[in-house]
Image: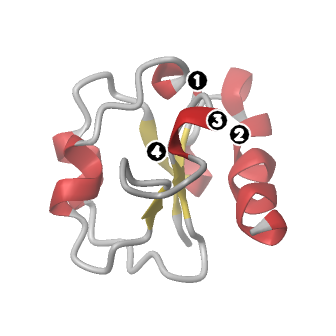
Amino acid sequence: MAYVIAEPCVGTKDNSCTEVCPVDCIHPTPDEPDYDKVEQLYIDPDECIDCDACVEACPVDAIFAEDQIPDEWTSFVDKNIKYFEAA
């Protein structure tokens, strides 16, 4: 099970989570070409090792375990998956 970035990240894109991720599975990073084109960050579900480091680092509490995401933000599970399918 991967972690998912939800609505509180939209428009924020604080990079604290990318800095602590041991497997670099959160994208886009500021040095990637699509960083300015997307409204939030995403976690690659195939790369995430469920370490929980990003959850603690997120200043806007936008990251949840996939099975613990609030009902109003469940659409972000698919949104995260689709970001990496399109890449």
The residue depicted at 36 percent of the width and 47 percent of the height is 30
Q: Residues within 10 Å of mark 2 (few under 14, many from 20)?
A: some
Residue 64 x %, y % = 46, 45
CB atoms of marks 4 and 2 within 8 Å: no
- Cα distance, mark 4 to mark 1? 11 Å
The image quadrant that residue 83 belongs to is bottom right
Q: Which mark is residue 17?
A: none
**Number of dots carrying numbers:** 4
Q: Which mark is residue 76?
A: 2
> Disc 3 marks which residue?
37
In this rendering, would 81 be left or right of 30?
Answer: right
Q: Which mark is residue 7?
A: 1
Residue 79 x %, y % = 76, 46
The secondary structure type at the circle numbered 1 is helix
- Cα distance, mark 2 to mark 1? 7 Å
| Residue depth check, mark 4 versus mark 1: number of the one nearer the observer | 1
| Residue depth check, mark 2 versus mark 3: number of the one nearer the observer | 3
> Disc 4 marks which residue?
64
Image vertical order of residue 24 relative to residue 66, above or below: below
The secondary structure type at the circle numbered 2 is helix
Q: At label 4, which amino acid type do we have?
A: Phe
Which residue is more in the foreground, 52 or 30?
A: 30
